[in-house]
Amino acid sequence: MKTSVRLALVGDYHSAITAHQAIPLATDLAAQHFSIEIHADWLATDTLTPEILQNYDAFWCVPGSPYRSTEGALSAIRFARENRKPFLGTCGGFQHAIIEYARNVMDWQDAGHGETDTEGRLVISALSCEMVEVKSEISFVPGSIPAGAYGKLEVEEGYHCRYGINTAFQAALDAQPLKMVGHDAAGEVRAVELPGHPFFVATLFQPERAALKGQLPPLVAALIKSLL
């Protein structure tokens, strides 16, 4: 069993972002729980190179978009997906995981984000109802990674986001190997996973916030467990 892991926190750190306050607490709780050392490094999106990415065992694309470099964030997600490195994307990480998949698996080279792009297929668009500092219920698909991590099919989690999957493209995405495994009460996608990958999960909600209450976030625990 490993005694230490290197975790890349892909995103542009800002002390005022609630999720960024929670993430170090979450990794500390995971380290205590599994009795290992977790060397978690913040990697600014405009500094990433293949040589840097190769130094890490797992990747967490964190909230805080728009990132300084969209391409940098997408390159880290692609690296994790193609090299079968455990990956967790939360909030902005979820949004960019969808864009990366659309571009590089579905070959939608014009896939973009409604917050920063004006042309092309905006697979990420403004939510019909903003989810800023609110909690909402999510239903997980039985047998999915999130369902296993939480040990139940219904949870309530916090959000701070204004963008999600564009419903105009949801059917096309749903036909892909990438699985939509978490939905809100209206049926909108809130979590995805990639079957056949050791661990590739992304959520529009911010599970890391549990650490602010001293609780180990189940998906962070699942991410680290996948390395052991």
Image (tube, grey):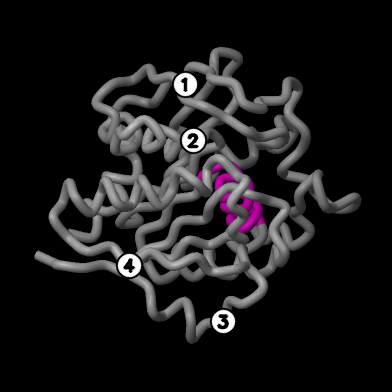
- Residue holding disc 3: 49
Quadrant of the rendering where the C terminus is positioned: bottom left
- Callout 1, which amino acid? Ile
**Horizontal and vertical percent position of residue 199:** 34, 53
For the residues labelled 2 and 1, say whether their Cβ atoms are less than 8 Å apart: yes
Q: Nearer the viewer, mark 4 or mark 3?
A: 4
- Callout 3, which amino acid? Thr
Number of marks: 4
Q: Is residue 228 left or right of residue 179?
A: left
- Label 1 sits on a secondary structure element that is strand
Q: Is residue 99 magenta?
A: yes
Does the magenta stretch mainly form a helix, a strand or a loop? helix
Give the mark nearest the N terminus, 1 or 3: 3
Residue 95 got which mark? Answer: none
Which residues are drawn in magenta? 90-102
- Label 3 sits on a secondary structure element that is loop
- Residue holding disc 4: 39
Give the mark nearest the N terminus, 4 or 2: 4
Neighbours of disc 3 within 10 Å: few (<14), some (14-19), many (20+): few
The residue most toward the top is 185
- Callout 2, which amino acid? Ala
- Label 4 sits on a secondary structure element that is strand
Q: Residue at 56% x, 45% y: name it.
A: 94
